[in-house]
């Protein structure tokens, strides 16, 4: 029982001859088709490919040589405001060197039985990434990375494989904390995600597609902050980035130009024709969850002890009732029952704010703790009734 309900990537040159124009159009069309195939391949295999083209027509050699000389000249002069990838002062190099040793691979393992008489076998169910947050072995990752695991493996940056203990996990925020028995590990520095702005540098570090590509670094920008997405019935507040995030990156680090972790990579928009849509959990949202998981092993949340249904505007007009949360069932001896709420009541206000959806209800509840009092207004038999409810502990 819970109270969330429906939370869960010029050479342009002008041809001097008409015959070359047709060749360029053909090459362009071929390039578009190859690009379409690559986009599909990215979302099915997650791998980028490089292609070489030798389609140089006779008569182009001089023009190409001139263009190469021009490109070399531009490279030597540089472009104002742009970072040279191989320059020592490129911030991404320093970021990778600083944070890379704090990012690990996480393996979800399950025990399987092929038949009743055979011994059990251990199988790899999936892989992801994690961030070392303390030198003595605490690691934060995504809940979906370790969910359902009977054993959790961790590959440290040096390649050593060790077993991890599950400390705690929280499905609602998609966060989990695990621990390895080790000392002197490099821990990541956690930043302040409340201060980031769209357009700032963003670097994603993780293990896309498994341990073979461990420690991969991708670069982009913060595309947006405060994105609200519904994921498996849960509402998540997320950072959007165009830094490539692929399967296996989940649980890895999203880092700012100072080498501070500002987000935990958690998902990407995977659809044909869509690219550059990655999302991360803001580190400021994750910090209190991490702390509680380490201390208690679970997240203590306030709850009301009800099951209910949203009454939409259309339904409200049809049945001549107000919009709100229709209480369908109350937990015996729960917070709502003790406050006098009964099935059929409609919750229309909480703490002076109108309630129409579960999201609105839960946003208010996030500001309170177990045993706090909240003021409610319910609608019953055509009348408004004010009452006070003492919040209980939500049991997921």
Image (spheres, grey):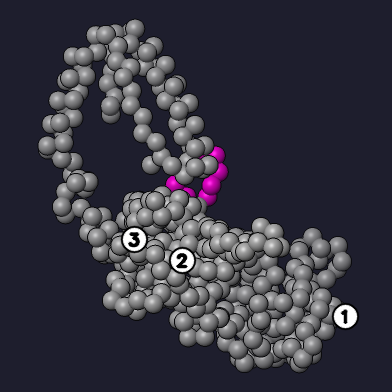
The answer to whether residue 389 is magenta is no
Q: Is residue 112 above or below residue 298?
A: above
Graded by Cα atoms within 10 Å as few (under 14), some (14 to 19) or many (20 or more), the crowding at tag 3 reads few
Q: Position of residue 148 (x, y in %)?
A: 60, 66
Q: Say whether residue 361 is visible.
A: no
Of residues 357 and 26, the one nearer the viewer is 26
Location of the C terminus (image quadrant): bottom right
Could you tell me which residue is drawn at 76 percent across and 76 percent down? 307
Q: Is residue 110 above or below residue 57?
A: below
For disc 2, the marked residue is 153
Residue segment shown in magenta: 269-278
Q: Which mark is residue 381?
A: 1
**SS at mark 3 in the image:** loop
Of residues 240 and 139, the one nearer the viewer is 139
Q: Earlier in the sequence, mark 3 or mark 1?
A: 3
Q: Say whether residue 167 is visible.
A: yes
Q: Is residue 367 above or below residue 162?
A: below
Graded by Cα atoms within 10 Å as few (under 14), some (14 to 19) or many (20 or more), the crowding at tag 1 reads few
- Per the picture, the main secondary structure of the magenta-coloured stretch is loop
Q: Which mark is residue 159?
A: 3
Q: Earlier in the sequence, mark 2 or mark 1?
A: 2
Could you tell me which residue is drawn at 52 percent across and 63 percent down? 108
Location of the N terminus (image quadrant): bottom right
Q: Earlier in the sequence, mark 3 or mark 2?
A: 2
Could you tell me which residue is drawn at 37 percent across and 13 percent down? 23
């Amino acid at each position: 029982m819970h109270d969330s309900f429906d939370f869960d990537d010029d050479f342009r040159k002008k041809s001097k001859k008409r015959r070359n124009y047709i060749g360029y159009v053909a090459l362009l069309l071929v390039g578009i088709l190859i690009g379409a195939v690559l986009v599909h391949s990215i979302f099915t295999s997650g791998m980028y490919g490089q292609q070489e083209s030798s389609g140089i027509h006779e008569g182009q050699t001089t023009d190409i040589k001139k263009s190469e000389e021009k490109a070399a000249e531009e490279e030597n002069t540089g472009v104002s405001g742009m970072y040279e990838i191989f320059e020592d002062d490129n911030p991404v190099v320093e970021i990778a060197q600083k944070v890379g040793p704090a990012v690990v691979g996480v393996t979800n393992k399950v025990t399987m039985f092929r038949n009743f008489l055979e011994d059990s076998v251990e199988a790899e169910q999936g892989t992801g990434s994690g961030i070392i947050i303390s030198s003595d072995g605490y690691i934060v990752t995504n809940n979906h990375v370790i969910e359902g695991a009977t054993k959790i493996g961790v590959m440290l940056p040096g390649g050593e494989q060790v077993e991890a203990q599950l400390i705690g996990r929280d499905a609602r925020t998609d966060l989990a904390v695990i621990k390895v028995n080790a000392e002197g590990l490099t821990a990541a520095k956690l930043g302040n995600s409340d201060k980031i702005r769209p357009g700032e540098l963003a670097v994603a570090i993780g293990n896309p597609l498994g341990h073979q590509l461990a420690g991969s670094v991708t670069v982009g920008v913060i595309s947006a902050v405060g994105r609200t997405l519904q994921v498996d019935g849960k509402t998540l507040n997320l950072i959007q980035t165009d830094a490539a995030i692929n399967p296996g990156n989940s649980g890895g680090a999203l880092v700012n130009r100072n080498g501070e972790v500002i987000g935990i990579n958690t998902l990407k928009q995977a659809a044909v024709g869509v690219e550059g849509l990655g999302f991360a959990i803001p580190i400021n949202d994750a910090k209190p969850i991490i702390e509680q998981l380490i201390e208690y092993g679970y997240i203590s949340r306030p709850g009301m002890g009800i099951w209910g249904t949203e009454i939409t505007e259309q339904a409200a007009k049809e049945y001549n009732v107000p919009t709100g949360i229709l209480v369908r069932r109350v937990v015996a001896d729960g917070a709502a029952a003790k406050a006098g709420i009964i099935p059929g009541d409609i919750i229309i206000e909480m703490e002076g704010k109108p309630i129409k959806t579960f999201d609105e209800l839960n946003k208010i509840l996030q500001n309170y703790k177990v045993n706090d009092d909240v003021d409610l207004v319910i609608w019953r038999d055509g009348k408004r009734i004010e009452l006070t409810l003492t919040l209980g502990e939500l049991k997921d």
